Amino acid sequence: MVRKEFRQLLRDRRTRAVIFVSPLLQLLMFGYAVNTDIRDTATFVVDLDATAASRRLVDAFVATGYFEVVGRSDRPADLVRALDHGHALIGIEIPRGFARDLTGGGAAVQVIVDGTESNSATIAQGYASRIVRRFALEQAAAVGALPSGGVDLRARAWYNPNLESRAYNVPAVIGVLIMLMCLLLTALAVVRERELGTLDQLMVSPLTPGELMISKTLPVAVIALFDLAAVSLLAIVWFRIPMQGSPLVLLPAALLYILGGLAVGLLISTVSRTQQEAFMSMFLFFQPSIILSGFFYPIDSMPRFFRWVTLGNPVRHFLEVVRAVFLKGAGFIDLWPQYLGLALLAGAVLWLAVIRFPRTMAG
């Protein structure tokens, strides 16, 4: 029966594409598209000072690669117009007397950001603040007027020194793709047999419901492990995401995660009469599980109630494991709460699926 399921999954060209090609393409797409870093941000400059110092400040912005000057003017109204029409995300206004005030330690620069894209605006504003501070310190050092009595803050980011969003997002995409694969292939298993009229034949076969469950899920589990290895290798080789930890730490969590995904898919297949119903049920589970996983939004910024809800989401626990293994080099001891969560959730859903499956076979 297991060999039959393997042949059934692999003989169809479209199914083979879903199994082997789709995860790699989706990782490439998400790896490039889901990126909160900013590059070449459209910037409009109003330089009312028009001095060498003001030009050096603008050059300092451009040199970082985060900002691209798309327009210049000596009229503040042009800056407002550029932001209103969406031609620029950030505006820099350098007032008259900037160079003179800079030597006196009281120079001011106005940075205006388009807040409609709140994430990009926040990041751009942070970059702009750091660039202006660094420029002021460099100018003060050049004239021998280093500030005294202040706090010398030297911040360092561990695990992701360049604060690249791709290093944070790509490992999470791996977990999302594996769950999608488990749900997609398993949720249609029993429903497909029912629609093809072969469920009655399986009911009179000598196979027990448990053996039939294993035959439906074991091939998908093997395929999911293969996809996990393939997309992880792609993340390491193509996106240069370092795996600081051991794959042996990731493997047990992956097995529990895949078991939970198979159990959810099997449970969906037992409550769906048609493949369309199975797709709808899968979507109703998949979308909230991704939203409440920490993939798009930090869990710490969610309301307290939803933070508690995320504890019942296997995707959250696995994403924490994947990110910790890839970026932090975490070990078993560091991740035991996530292992426990995955084991409890997989066991609970599998128990429900075991109860439902014989009833589906009988009904």
Image (spheres, rainbow, N blue to C red):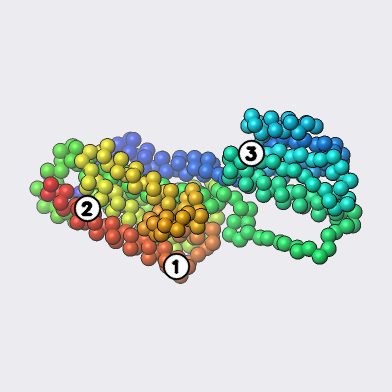
User: Position of 312 compared to 215: left or right?
Assistant: right
The residue labelled by disc 1 is 332
Is residue 18 among what the camera can see? yes
Q: Residue drawn 69% across and 30% down?
A: 81
Amino acid under label 2? Met
- Return the disc, 1 or 2, that comes first in the chain's sequence: 2
Q: How many numbered callouts?
A: 3
The single residue placed furthest to the left in the displayed view is 204
Q: Label 3: how many residues lie within 10 Å, few (<14), some (14-19) or many (20+)? A: some
Rendered location of residue 258, percent (x, y)? 35, 54
Q: In front: 129, or 328? A: 129
Distance CA(mark 3)–CA(mark 2): 54 Å
The residue labelled by disc 2 is 213
Quarter location, residue 43: top right
User: Position of 260 compared to 95: left or right?
Assistant: left
The residue labelled by disc 3 is 114
- The vertical placement of 54 against 161, above or below, is above
Amino acid under label 3? Asp
Rendered location of residue 354, percent (x, y)? 21, 56
Q: In front: 202, or 336? A: 336
CB atoms at circles 1 and 2 under 8 Å apart?
no
Q: Label 2: how many residues lie within 10 Å, few (<14), some (14-19) or many (20+)? A: some
Q: Residue drawn 19% across and 53% down?
A: 356
Q: Which mark is residue 176?
A: none
Q: Secondary structure at mark 1?
A: loop
- The vertical placement of 24 against 241, above or below, is above
Rendered location of residue 54, percent (x, y)? 83, 41
Distance CA(mark 1)–CA(mark 2): 30 Å
Q: Secondary structure at mark 3?
A: loop
